[in-house]
Image (cartoon, rainbow, N blue to C red):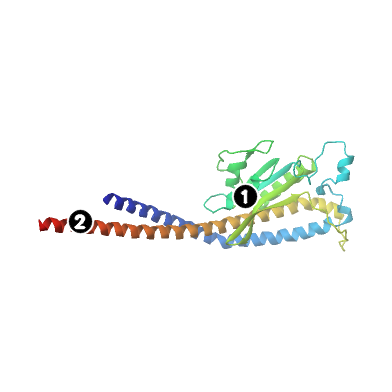
Amino acid sequence: MAKDIKSLRTRIKSFDSTLHLTGAMGLVASSKIKRACDAMYASRKYSDGISDVTMALAACPECRKSPYFGLEKKDLENTEEETVSADNNESARTRLIVIAGDRGLCGGYNANVFRTVRTMEAFEIKPIGKRSYDKYHIVDIEGEDEETDADETGYLSSERYTYEDALEEAETCCKDFLEGKIDRVLVVYNRYISIMSQEPQVIQLLPLERASVIKDLGSICEPAPDVIFEDLIPVYFAAKLYALVKESFACEVAARRMAMDSAKKNAQQMIDDLKLEYNRARQSTITQEITEIVSGAGK
């Protein structure tokens, strides 16, 4: 019985340490939520503004022949080179940008992204976030990932991701797309629904979708709509990517806050149950000792 009491005391101490750890991590996540959400809303507003301008230009007759829309079927039939259509999911050379967190202990945040990636075929994977870098930073030409350890400076942090990082990635992707090295660019990220709910999403940044209706901008563009459109695409790409990274980070912080709150409640419940069991065991031991003393005194 004494052995059981000692074991229970050790377990209570262990859960108490976990309770303090999860409580501290929950407080840290709480302190970051407002700042992360403010950055998400600000980047989303900027992204929506750039998208409105880009889509308005995309509907102009002068811009509809831009290579950023990809090749149409009639173009594919006329070309003599072996080219794959970006609309063909099975054969398109897809560059997949996977946004995950820098740390764990955030529920299913990272696991949901990786589960989504497993259902997709990718020619190349570009990771953002340490967890994504650890899993995907070496990818062979067949799209199969090899897990290796990341160093401290070899990855792009999702928390400290800057617009300059996004613009650099945008210029690289646009250049590779125009040169025919890739056929499309997809981003896997977590969409922020509420502090209690986040879900993985896939969004296509390249090629652009053609507008179904051709319309006039109603304004004069200098030097020309198609010239402005070509220069605007990397900015559009960067704004979208930056907004998605900031949204993913807000999801990570919210998921960690909820995970730590749940872990804290579970740890407290375990401590209460173990203390009850400990008190019963201790009371039983004391009762047994008193009984033995009384029995010995009677003899």
> From where the camera sits, is residue 134 visible?
yes
Other-residue count near label 1 (Cα within 10 Å), few / some / many at <14 / 14–19 / ≥20:
many
Residue topped by disc 1: 113
Query: Distance from label 1 to label 2 (Cα)?
Result: 58 Å
Report whether 118 appears left or right of 255.
right
Residue plotted at (89% across, 53% down) = 62
Corner quadrant of residue 78: top right
Query: Which residue is outermost to the left?
Result: 299
Q: Amino acid at mark 2?
A: Glu
Tag shown at residue 289: 2
Q: Amino acid at mark 1?
A: Val
Residue 126 x/y as whole percent = 66, 44
Front residue of 155/298: it is: 298
Residue 6 x/y as whole percent = 30, 51
Q: Secondary structure at mark 1?
A: helix
Vertical comparison of 287 with 73: above or below:
below
